Image: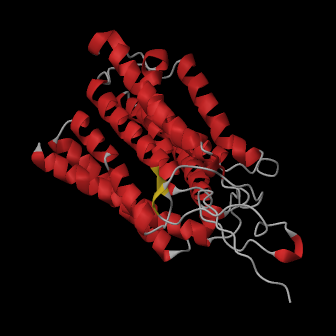
Amino acid sequence: MIAGIAVAAAAACCYEGAYVLQALEAREESGGARLQASLLRRLVRRPRWLFGTALSAVGALLQVFALTLAPLTVVQPTLALGLVLLLTLSATVLHEHVGRRELLGVAMVVCGVVLVAIMAPADTSKSLGNLATAVMLGLLGAVALLPFLLRRRLHDARLRVVAAAAGDAWAAIGLKLVADALQRHAWLPLIAWAVGAIAAGAIALTAEMSALQRIAATRVAPVVLAVQVLVPVIAGPLALDESWSGTPLDGVALGAAVLLVAAGAALLGASGAVAGTRASGEDSGGSGPIGGRGRGGGGPGDAGSGALGKQVEDDVGGEREARVRGVG
């Protein structure tokens, strides 16, 4: 058990380290005002981004190894605790603002994930190819594709976070369907679901990297993780032939844990600072900083103030500093 926790902790470090490296590279790419389908193609040419992706793959291998040493109810919470490391790396490496909202939101997500992992029912589903599953995947796919279809009209970066979360959830369920097809030796469905899971993962990765160009990593990663936890658990009794009746208090405690995760994600996602308003010049309020740089106010230094000034820098995540350049 102790070895499993240690390996899971190492996996969490790999995941969060990889996330920071990918965020650094994504932010060096131009074009963050709009979601660009070509972003992923440009990022794969960057050695540091590739190294981050490889580090994430190492984390996945360590996670699998950890599951051979400890149960899922131990491994999953340990991985969720990696968000605490992400807070530290975001403040020190990415120079992001980490305030009370971020700390509270991440704490709620971590605690909720721990409780869900402890109380979630065992995977007992046997038939996954039903109508409810198809409807659920259709909705997730539509949400994942929406920002790409409307990228010329909608520039709110929060939609990219939602798309990334939906795409990752689709990919996770798709892999579950792949495993089910493998057990039934249904090779054509297996190939179809595998292709779908890979496509959904690519869409999610593109949306997430684009979101990281304009939104703090401390507000992207927890939301994506929360949806990855919530969708399979909620979908269990609705589409995957699973039941909450065997969980504590006949599902009431599990439902409360799910709501805690959702509330933490909503707290992080609802902030105006998550909107990523480089292009629009909007300002955001917020709580007092604990790490990273502070925010500047509006006034004569804002973009659009004519000859008196020009905005030359704004922090990712909507934490903006305005600087004034004198005229002639």
Residue at the image position 22 percent from the left and 38 percent from the top: 74
Vertical position of residue 155 compared to residue 169: above or below: below
Residue nearest the observer in this picture, 236 or 280: 280
In the figure, residue 177 lies in which quadrant? top left
The x and y percentages for residue 267 are: 52, 38
Residue drawn at x 51%, y 63% is: 23
Q: Does the image show residue 125?
A: no
Q: Is residue 68 left or right of residue 55?
A: left
Measuring from the top left, give residue 55's x and y in whole percent: 36, 64
Q: x and y percent of residue 286 in the render?
A: 57, 49
Horizontal side of residue 42 vs 242, given as left or right = right
Q: Is residue 308 above or below residue 82?
A: below
Q: Quadrant of the N terminus?
A: top left
Residue at (40%, 38%) from the top-left corner?
A: 109
Q: Nearer the viewer, residue 143 or 183?
A: 143
| Of 125 and 165, the residue lying toward us | 165
Here the colouring is secondary structure
Name the spot of residue 172 as percent of width and height, x first.
45, 38
Query: Is 4 located above or below residue 175 in the figure?
Result: below
